[in-house]
């Protein structure tokens, strides 16, 4: 039996468990299972890996995407530059195990965003500067799209929401929400920007996927812009995790 799973805390629900459970069943992949490991502190990670030698791969979610780094033997280029890991491959050896970290969030976001982009999409606004913004920044740098980060409180290298005006929005036509604004059950919240200034040239990407269309996305769509939520990104990062675990 090959085992895979997700560490985080708390883990009240999980996209990954359903995704992989459905995948194993629909594709008749035998002798594989995917479990949730809600460990209350990262120090328990070592015991989890050493005590269950059937574990071949782990996904990582809040709050451990950074905290897990000291436990790794190796990291890929994306996770090294981003400074966060959400996928770990586990190779067993006679002496123990070799853990390599990856950031498949970046892959999922990039592949999901690219179909929306036109040549004139040269500048972006990123709403929020938390952990989710790390992979977004990495991808935009890779795609040569310059960006400004917009936050509610003053922070180094960031601008405040009241600085987002019509002139800024004319230049920055890629809008990315990395905050929980709009996420159920607080679906009536949204990034506070002057939506009346938006046009059909704007692209809005929301990492939130529940509800399927946030107020942020709806406001952009109603002004002719292209929109996408974060569900495809989740699917793509999960598919990439499976590829990594089967290298």
Image: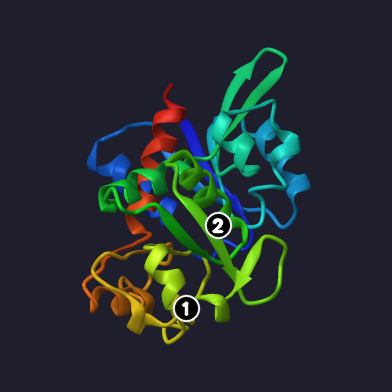
Residue matched to label 1 = 165
Quick one: 96 or 109, which is closer to the camera? 109
Q: How many marks?
A: 2
Which one is in front in this view, the residue at disc 2 or the one at disc 1? Answer: 1
Quick one: 35 or 217, which is closer to the camera? 217
Marks 2 and 1: CB-CB under 8 Å? no
On the question of residue 230 being in view, the answer is: yes
Q: Which residue occupies the extreme front position in the image?
A: 167
Q: Which mark is residue 152?
A: none
Q: Which residue occupies the extreme top position in the image?
A: 94
Q: Label 2: how many residues lie within 10 Å, few (<14), some (14-19) or many (20+)?
A: some
Percent position of residue 245, x then y: 46, 29
Quick one: 199 or 213, which is closer to the camera? 199
Q: Is residue 133 above or below residue 169?
A: above
Q: Quadrant of residue 46?
A: top right
Left of 11 or right of it: where is 14?
left
Which label's residue is closer to the chain start, 2 or 1? 2
Q: Could you tell me which secondary element the residue under label 2 belongs to?
A: helix
Instruction: Measure the C-alpha gap from mark 2 to mark 1.
Output: 24 Å
Q: Label 1: how many residues lie within 10 Å, few (<14), some (14-19) or many (20+)?
A: few
Q: Quadrant of residue 190?
A: bottom left
Residue at 59 percent of width and 37 percent of height: 79
Percent position of residue 216, x then y: 38, 76
Q: Could you tell me which secondary element the residue under label 1 belongs to?
A: loop
Residue at 25 percent of width and 68 percent of height: 225
Percent position of residue 244, x then y: 45, 29
Residue at 70 percent of width and 20 percent of height: 96
Residue matched to label 2 = 132
Percent position of residue 237, x then y: 41, 44
Residue at 66 percent of width and 22 percent of height: 97
Left of 171 or right of it: where is 151?
right
On the question of residue 32 being in view, the answer is: no
């Amino acid at each position: 039996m090959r085992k895979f799973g997700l560490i985080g805390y708390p883990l009240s629900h999980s996209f990954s468990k359903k995704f992989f459970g459905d995948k194993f069943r629909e594709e008749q992949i035998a002798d594989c299972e995917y479990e949730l490991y809600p460990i209350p502190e990262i120090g328990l990670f070592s015991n989890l890996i050493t005590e269950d030698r059937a574990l071949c791969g782990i996904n990582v979610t809040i709050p451990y995407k950074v905290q897990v780094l000291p436990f790794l033997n190796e990291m890929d280029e994306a996770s090294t530059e981003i400074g966060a890991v959400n996928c770990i491959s586990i190779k067993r050896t006679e002496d123990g195990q070799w853990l390599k970290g990856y950031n498949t969030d970046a892959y999922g976001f990039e592949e999901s965003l690219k179909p929306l982009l036109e040549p004139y999409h040269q500048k972006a606004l990123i709403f929020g500067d938390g952990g989710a913004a790390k992979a977004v920044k990495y991808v935009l740098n890779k795609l040569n799209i310059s960006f400004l980060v917009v936050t509610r409180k003053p922070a180094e290298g960031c601008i405040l929401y009241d600085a987002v005006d019509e002139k800024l929005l004319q230049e920055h036509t890629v809008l990315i929400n990395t905050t929980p604004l709009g996420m159920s059950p607080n679906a009536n919240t949204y990034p506070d920007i002057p939506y009346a200034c938006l046009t059909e040239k704007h692209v809005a990407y929301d990492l939130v996927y529940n509800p399927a269309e946030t107020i942020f996305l709806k406001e952009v769509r109603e002004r002719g812009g292209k929109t996408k939520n974060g569900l495809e990104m989740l699917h793509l990062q999960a598919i990439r995790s499976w590829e990594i675990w089967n290298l």
